[in-house]
Image (cartoon, rainbow, N blue to C red):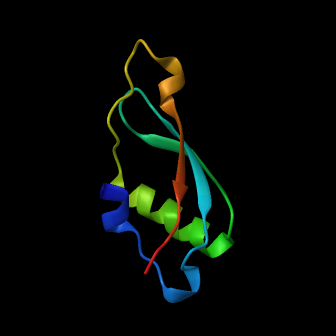
Amino acid sequence: GLIEQNWRIDPSMNGKKVVVSITVGKDGTVTGENCEGDAKVCESAISAIKLVGMFPRPPATCPQCSNIKISMTPKL
């Protein structure tokens, strides 16, 4: 929900799916943003994630939980 609230899209992006990969640190900071798909949608999606700032901390018992892939498709 927080990503959607910060995501700025325009009509040219409608329906263009991207997949964003991020790493969430032990303190909830986001690093290692990578995106596959339309360049303009990727730029917008990564900007939205950066605006969120902090994410929930991954459980200490789940090291793989810090690597997240998010499929995003703008819809107007």
Q: Which quadrant of the figure contains the N terminus?
A: bottom left
Q: Residue at x 61, y 72 (%)?
A: 16
Q: Is residue 52 above or below residue 24?
A: below
Which residue sits at x=42%, y=63%?
A: 48
Residue 19 percent across, percent down from the top left: 61, 54
Give the position of the C terminus as an image quadrant.
Answer: bottom left
Quick check: 60 above or below 25?
above
Q: Could you tell whether 76 is left or right of 37 in the image?
A: left
Residue placed at 42% from the left, 75% from the top?
Answer: 8
Which sits in the foreground, 29 or 64? 64
Horizontal relation, residue 2 to residue 48: left or right: left
In the displayed structure, does residue 69 sit left or right of residue 37? left
Give residue 34's position: percent from left, percent from top.
63, 51
Which residue corresponds to the image point at 51% horizontal and 64% vertical from the top-left? 45
Residue 26 occupies which quadrant of the picture?
A: top left
**Residue 62, horizontal then vertical, whole percent:** 46, 17
Quarter of the image for residue 37 reads: bottom right
Residue 50 at x, y percent in the picture: 43, 56
Figure check: 44 above or below 56:
below
